[in-house]
Image (cartoon, grey):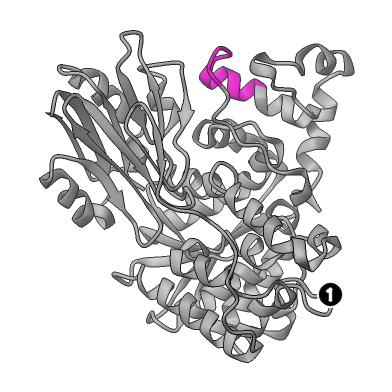
Amino acid sequence: MAGIAGIAAKGAGEKVAGMLGRMRHRGKTGLAVFENEGTTLGIVWNDAEIETVKNYLAAGNVGYDNGPGHYSRVTPEKGKFILCRDELGVAPLYYGRDLAGNLCFASEIKALLLATNEIKELSPGHFFDGTSLKSFFSLKAGPHTDENPERLAQHLKERLDNAVTDCINSENIGSWLSGGLDSSAICAIAARHLRQLKTFTAGLKDAPDLEFAREVAGFIKSEHHEAIVTLDDLLSALPEVIYYLESFDALLVRSSITNFLVAKLASGYVQEVFSGEGGDELFAGYGYLKSIPSAQLEDELVKLTRSLHNTALQRVDRCASAHGIIAHAIFTDPDVVKFAFTIPSRYKIYNNIEKWILRKALEGSLPERVLMRPKMKFWEGAGIKELISGYADKIISDSEFMNERNIHGGFIVNTKEELHYYRIFRDHFGSDIDLSFMGRTPESRVV
């Protein structure tokens, strides 16, 4: 995914070029730095993004569009910036002010730190003009216009199909495939529109994801690739993962390790991939949701979907961008999101089956065993589970944990595993930056 950066001041070309240099992994094809309207701004981009990037540059702006619901853009205006981020926050965007009071922005924190230690995340679905935030998107449920489950399932499948085809511009595209319902659903749809879809998965030897992914790949006849990793591979990758992820949230880091490795694998074959992120939030994939009364379920799903931008979607963005590829999170397509919240909640959890309506929509498109596979966290399905936390318990004493768990800004490190991640994070980014940008995975999503 492309990367953008800028400072609301003239003559800041060298600083902005340095900011882009820290994000060159996001765009290996081109780089542009220029002044406009009393500001300095720039962008790095990849081949697959060149058309939309050129359109922004021709207008004197910076930005990129990687399909519906996946964009960020900045418009200079009379010495100021107008920042804009997509509806759910698939594309990242941060801002802050330097010592001279100039507004600065960047797609990643590591770049913004060259200009300021004040790090603020632009809220998804908002404009920011340097003074005030203005919302242009409101995520809400309803109204429910069609309650026939057969029709709902058909309409859902059509919208997913449209979202996939909107992202296909060449055969140089593949898909991450965990073998879970969401990624398998996207792979099954994408395979119908490509001569041969390339699929990618990673995990420890004998991990459930490897087995299920192979079954799906055989069923849809994809060209399948897998990375079988060891605990040493996971530990070796951690410093890079945390550097690119820009977070020490334990559950997020844990799920990012195999995502990072599978993105590395995919980058050797394709420039773009599909991701199944977002299906659990839209269609009630977490086990704890079964205990929530149906009348309250939709509000909980809205809450979960709103929390994606600095947790799971951040993982998708950073893992793909670290290796110079573009990830398309199909379930975040605005048309899919809007339609999902018109589906009555009783069809999302039906007969105690989570994501029932999505399973209904994919009947016949996937092996029955995969179609009915229960939810597993990314790190569980990949076979990681408690390996990393067990390692952290061995290298961090109880006294070290108690002495180091309270960090600045009111953050409290919850486990030794998270402290291990924080130590790596601190080595990369220092200990005095504003951490208000950092998301924490809701504990409920562990269940």
Q: Quadrant of residue 177?
A: bottom right
Whole-percent x, y for residue 125 in the image:
43, 48
Judge the density around disc 1: few (<14), some (14-19), many (≥20) Cα neighbours within 10 Å: few
- The magenta region covers 423-434
- At x 32%, y 32%, the residue is 129
Q: Amino acid at mark 1?
A: Asn
Q: Residue furthest right?
A: 398
**32 relative to 7, above or below:** below
Give me the residue at 64% from left, 39% from top.
253
User: In the image, residue 316 lies at what x, y percent?
Assistant: 52, 50
- Residue 437 appears at what percent x and percent y? 54, 30
Q: For the residue labelled by badge 1, is the local secondary structure a helix, a strand or a loop? A: loop
In reply to whether residue 125 is colored magenta, the answer given is: no
Q: Which residue is mark 1?
A: 352
Q: Nearer the viewer, residue 222 or 375?
A: 375
Vertical side of 278 occupied by 5: above or below: above
* Residue 344 appears in the figure: yes
For this view, does 221 lie left or right of residue 357?
A: left
- Quadrant of residue 356 in the image? bottom right
When asked about the image quadrant of residue 432, the answer is top right
Q: Where in the figure is residue 313, as x and y percent of width and height?
A: 53, 49
Residue depicted at x 71% and y 78% = 347
Up-down: is 348 above or below 334? below
Q: Residue at x 18, y 32 (%)?
A: 77
In this view, the residue in front, 143 or 105, is 143
Residue 226 is at least partly visible in this image: no
**In this rendering, position of residue 181 left or right of residue 115:** right
Q: Is residue 72 left or right of residue 239?
A: left
| Closest to the observer, 317 or 242 | 317
